[in-house]
């Protein structure tokens, strides 16, 4: 559904359907969460397309300008990209400071809280991004295990 929406939006905007852009749209359509341009390029190549990283960046730029893709900064210095749903549906992100893993989450109570802040401040919020940083469950387990295994004198 998103891929068809993207194709229609690009055509309406006067963009021709290039091979690289089509391949990037196909990859984005199958993604659940954000990925870096390099990760997207790797998937495009894994799908059998011979597309360079510069073409992927150009495609992502056009898709971002058209509002079809959201560019996210999750704090690791690398921009990440994910499709923007036409109906405004979205999710937020958890980022592990230890391993860099990015996970998505949805929380209706958080959405209501954001709406409440907007109402209270008489502000119209058109979009928002929430990125929570911390330690993922796997890294927490590893940290706990390594502390438990450390000699008593080291604790």
Image (spheres, rainbow, N blue to C red):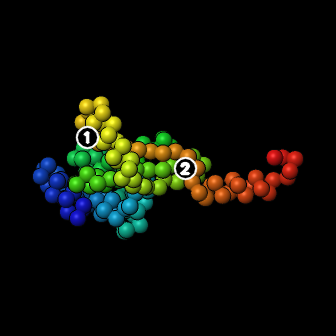
Residue at 48% of width from left, 41% of height from top?
Answer: 75
Which of the pair 140/121 is nearer the observer?
Answer: 121
Q: Residue at x 87, y 47 (%)?
A: 153
Rendered location of residue 13, percent (x, y): 14, 49
Q: At x 84% / y 46%, what residue is drawn?
A: 154
Quadrant of res 72 = top left
Residue at 24% x, 47% y is 67
The answer to whether residue 33 is seen in the rendering is yes
Furthest residue in direction right, as rendered: 153
| Residue at the extreme top of the image, as rendered | 121
Q: Which residue is denoted by mark 1 in the rendering?
A: 126
Quick one: SS at disc 1?
A: loop
Residue 17: x and y in percent read 19, 58
Q: Position of residue 38 (x, y in %)?
A: 43, 53
Q: Which of the pair 139/112 is nearer the observer?
A: 112
| Disc 2 secondary structure class | strand
**Picture coordinates of residue 41 (x, y %)?**
39, 57
Looking at the image, can residue 41 be seen? no
Q: Are marks 2 and 1 in contact (CB under 8 Å)?
A: no
Which mark is on residue 96? Answer: 2
Q: How many marks?
A: 2
Mark 2 to mark 1 CA distance (whole Å)? 27 Å
């Amino acid at each position: 559904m998103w891929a068809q929406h993207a194709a229609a939006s690009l055509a309406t905007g006067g963009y021709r359907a290039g091979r690289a852009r089509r391949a990037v749209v196909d990859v984005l359509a199958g993604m659940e969460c954000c990925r870096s341009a390099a990760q997207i390029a790797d998937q495009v190549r894994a799908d059998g397309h011979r597309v360079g990283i510069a073409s992927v960046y150009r495609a992502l730029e056009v898709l971002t300008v058209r509002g079809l893709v959201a560019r996210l900064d999750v704090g690791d210095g690398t921009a990440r990209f994910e499709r923007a749903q036409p109906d405004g549906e979205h999710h937020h992100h958890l980022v592990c400071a230890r391993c860099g893993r990015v996970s998505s989450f949805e929380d209706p109570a958080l959405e209501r809280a954001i709406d409440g802040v907007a109402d209270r401040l008489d502000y119209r919020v058109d979009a928002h991004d929430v990125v929570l940083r911390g330690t993922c469950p796997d890294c927490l387990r590893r940290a706990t295990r390594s502390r438990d295994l450390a000699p008593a004198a080291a604790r």
